[in-house]
Amino acid sequence: MALNKEQIARRIAQELQDGFYVNLGIGIPTLVANYIPKGVDVVLQSENGLLGMGPFPFEGDEDADLINAGKQTITTIPGSAFFDSAMSFGMIRAGKVHLTVLGAMEVADNGDIANWKIPGKMVKGMGGAMDLVAAAKNIIVAMQHTNPKGESKLLPKCSLPLTGVGCVKKVVTDLGVFDITPDGFKCIEYAPGVTIDEIKAKTAGRLVVADDVKEMVV
Amino acid sequence: MNKVVAGADEAVKDIPSGATLMLGGFGLCGIPENCITALVKSGINNLTCISNNAGVDDFGIGLMLQGRQVKKMIASYVGENAEFERQMLSGELEVELVPQGTLATRCMATGYGMPAVFLLAGIGTEVAQGKEVRNFNGKDYLLEHAFDSDYAIVKAWKGDTQGNLIFKGTARNFSPLMAMAGKITIAEVEHLVPIGELDPNAIHVPGIYVHRIFEGKNYEKRIEQRTVRKRNP
């Protein structure tokens, strides 16, 4: 069985390490915050100007002046700090944020990512994605393995306009976990009930399977 | 030094058609609602607007788009606005999409008197087209220019009659940077106080950058994504 969104988020949460400052993008990445392992102390950065992002507010406590980068109402927690957008991207650019998790339309087997534009159709803009992928030390992509038409999103080369070049380190999809290596996508885990043959069939980019590939624990 | 004007209409009345405006806010959070209403009423057009987003269809800069007042929009993300996307895809509206950190830093450069900065974002993408590239310590960077902005219009939480500003929560976002970048900067504030009432340690933008200030009214402060959790019974 392919993973659902919550399970993808739960698997990515296993990558969090104590002391990490983490930026979570919109969509599946946001869900990662719900599965931070016990005993792992991380601080969430929201690029609109907050470190120490707390959970959604209780009903009635929403504050229009307190949102995350997805424009959702949120809360602060003890230790939170506000800052302006230049400082926010300053800390990203200077490498202070340890991990960025974001979604993608396409990832190439060399780590290129496309997630901001479909020429002639969808033009929403890159928001902070280009800044994040250019600067973050560690970038994990959370996405479905195939698009709604069933076509692979793990490609030899992105067909859409790029967001960043050679920057993705790891991809977690509903089918498995893949490291970006000089040999292409390296499958290190497969989702429970998913076969390597299925992964091979649905991966258009170069794919190698790790010798010690194992079933994902989610 | 008293910079107080009567209200939004007076604050924006000399802005001519064709001007370049910076407008603070992230999504609808921290936008200068009163001044946007006054700009819509004024009917000026042919504007170049620099703002992270373009509002939604019926609020924020979206209201100015409806009235075809905007010739060119410089923004990082415009996904919440169907009319924007329509005008952009049909070619009615000129659009420059800029990575969010680059947008913020170009505003910052203006306010700090720096003509340009070297930034990493967009290397190897279409954002890099036509831009000068310099290599520092083995990495390529894009030369990004400061903005030239006739007016900056921001909303702050508190301000004093001398133009000192304090922002609240994530409504700060681009606003301090833009406030520093306008040739003329207009600040609308939720609370206007006499000088001496704000703690000098707490001021985000010193009044030297602010030319006009007034206390806004009837703030709607619309929330785009109301996300909540249930209280435990």
Image (tube, helix red, strand yellow):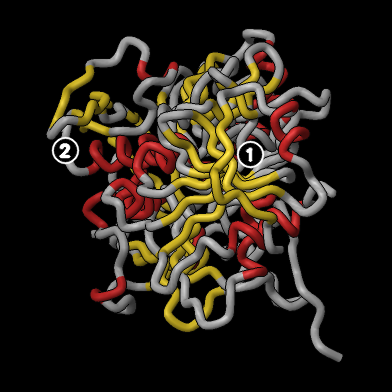
SS type, badge 2: loop
Q: Are marks 1 and 2 in contact (CB under 8 Å)?
A: no
> What is the chain identity of the residue bearing mark 1?
B
Residue A164 or residue B100, whichever sits in front? A164
Vertical position of residue A112 compared to residue B226: above or below: above
- x, y percentage for residue B45? 55, 19
Residue B50 appears in the figure: yes
- x, y percentage for residue B205? 29, 58
Where is residue A203, by image quadrant? top right
Residue identified by numbered label 2: B113
Residue identified by numbered label 1: B55
Vertical position of residue B175 compared to residue A41: above or below: above
Q: Amino acid at mark 1?
A: Gly
The residue lying furthest to the front in this view is: A211
The residue lying furthest to the left in this view is: B137
Residue at the image position 59 percent from the left and 23 percent from the top: A205
Where is residue A167, by image quadrant? top left
Which mark sits nearer the N-terminus, 1 or 2? 1
Residue at the image position 59 percent from the left and 57 percent from the top: A12
Residue B105 shown left or right of residue A165 in the figure = left
Residue A76 or residue A216, whichever sits in front? A216
- x, y percentage for residue B34? 58, 48
Q: Are marks 1 and 2 on the same chain?
A: yes
The residue lying furthest to the bottom in this view is: B233
Residue B228 shown left or right of residue B193 in the figure = right
Which quadrant is home to the C terminus of chain A? bottom right
- x, y percentage for residue A157? 54, 18
Q: Amino acid at mark 2?
A: Gly
> What is the chain identity of the residue bearing mark 2?
B
Residue at the image position 36 percent from the left and 35 percent from the top: B102
Where is residue B196, by image quadrant? bottom left
